[in-house]
Image (cartoon, helix red, strand yellow):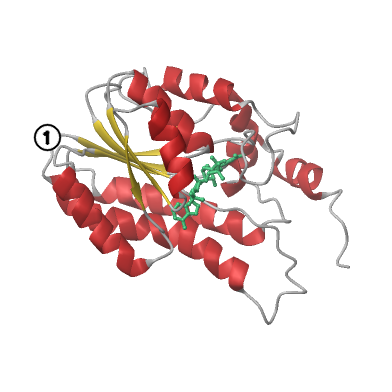
């Protein structure tokens, strides 16, 4: 991916990692369009960067995605980069939720079906560009699950798999497919902004932007902090890492 001169759509660009990427890419001379549900979060971001544009989108809403994609393609004909970043993460007690799968369903709709639907809706437009990029945001938890958030981790593992297939199917096109694999970063995703164990957002974005300088861009964008999880299986320490992350979890109360 070229680091400048693109027209870029970032879902969930009004906060956290999406906002950090939006600001860093905007600073490098890209046209950035951010999307999300909360108008206020979007407006706070665009107010700080008036050339940035925003559009509201609820990525859980299947019908809305089609009209949103048509609008984006119409208003931003040069759009050539899609960053599928919007996501939610919820704790779930699997023994207690048998009758109510609302959190599980919302998580699948947002984190998995959302990016799949938006990618499908924008692919015809991206195919027309001289070069294009789809960047999917997965997680280190795609590689070792945090059992407290089972469906979240399952959607991220699925995004990893989907991204590999998408890359393979698009190999003969001018669309490159990247996967951004964050570690635990201090954002509002799970109220982690004050957690000293989380990587500071600014530090994470700086390291990601350094990786994006590499040409060609590595298909998997992994900052140092996430490599322990990303390569847990390959390192032979998967079981120890799984137990270390989940061992202290409360029992099935
Ligand atoms: N922070 C971490 O530790 C971490 C680690 C690994 C991966 N990630 C991934 O990084 C991505 C960004 O998360 P973050 O940490 O930056 O958390 P965040 O600040 O909570 O950002 C999530 C963004 O997604 C948007 N979003 C959620 N549901 C949406 C919906 N239905 N439609 C449209 N937009 C929606 C939110 O905007 P609205 O609420 O305004 O819609 C928000 O801007 C997520 O995919 C997350 O899984 C984060």
Residue behind mark 1 = 130
Q: Is mark 1 within 8 Å of ligand 1?
A: no
Find residue 200 and report its image quarter: top right
Q: Residue shown at 33%/60% (left/top)?
A: 117
Which quadrant is the N terminus positioned in?
top left
Percent position of residue 169, x then y: 26, 51
Total number of numbered labels? 1
> Is 161 above or below relative to 134?
below
At which x and y percent is residue 62?
Answer: 35, 67
The residue depicted at 41 percent of the width and 62 percent of the height is: 113
Q: Estimate the x, y position of residue 221 in percent, counting from the top left.
A: 45, 31
Viewer-proximal residue, 134 or 192? 192
Is 43 placed left or right of 30 in the picture?
right
From the viewer's perspective, is 24 left or right of 72? right
Residue beneath the point at 65% across and 57% down: 90
Figure quadrant of the C terminus: bottom right
Residue 166 appears left or right of 237: left
Depth check: 154 or 39 in front?
Answer: 39
SS category of the residue bearing label 1: loop
Q: Within 10 Å of the Cα at label 1, are there few (<14), some (14-19), or many (20+) other Cα atoms?
A: few
The reply to whether residue 220 is in sight is no
* Residue at far bottom of view: 99
Q: Position of 178 compared to 31: left or right?
A: right
Q: Residue at x 60, y 72 (%)?
A: 102
Q: Is residue 92 visible?
A: yes
Q: Position of residue 147 (x, y in %)?
A: 72, 56
């Amino acid at each position: 991916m070229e680091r400048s001169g693109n027209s870029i759509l970032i879902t969930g660009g009004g906060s956290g990692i999406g906002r950090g990427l939006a600001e860093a890419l905007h600073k490098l001379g890209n046209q950035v369009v951010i999307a999300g549900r909360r108008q206020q979060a979007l407006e706070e971001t665009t107010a700080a960067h008036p050339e940035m544009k925003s559009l509201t989108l609820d990525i859980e809403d299947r019908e809305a995605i089609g009209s949103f994609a048509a609008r984006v393609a119409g208003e931003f004909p040069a759009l050539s980069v899609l960053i599928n970043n919007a996501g939610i993460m919820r704790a779930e007690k699997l023994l207690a939720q048998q009758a109510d799968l609302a959190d599980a369903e919302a998580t699948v709709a947002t984190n998995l079906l959302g990016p799949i639907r938006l990618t499908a809706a924008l692919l015809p437009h991206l195919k027309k560009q001289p070069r294009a990029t789809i960047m999917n945001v997965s997680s280190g938890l795609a590689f070792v699950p945090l059992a407290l958030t089972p469906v979240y981790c399952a959607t991220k593992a699925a995004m990893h798999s989907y991204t590999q297939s998408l890359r393979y199917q698009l190999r003969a096109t001018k669309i490159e497919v990247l996967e951004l694999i964050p570690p635990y970063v201090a954002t509002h995703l799970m109220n982690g902004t004050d957690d000293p164990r989380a990587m500071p957002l600014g530090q994470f974005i700086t390291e990601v932007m350094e990786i994006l300088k590499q040409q060609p861009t590595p298909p998997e964008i992994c900052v140092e902090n996430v490599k322990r999880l990303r390569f847990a299986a390959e390192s032979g320490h998967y079981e120890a890492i799984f137990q270390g992350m989940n061992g202290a979890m409360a029992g099935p109360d």
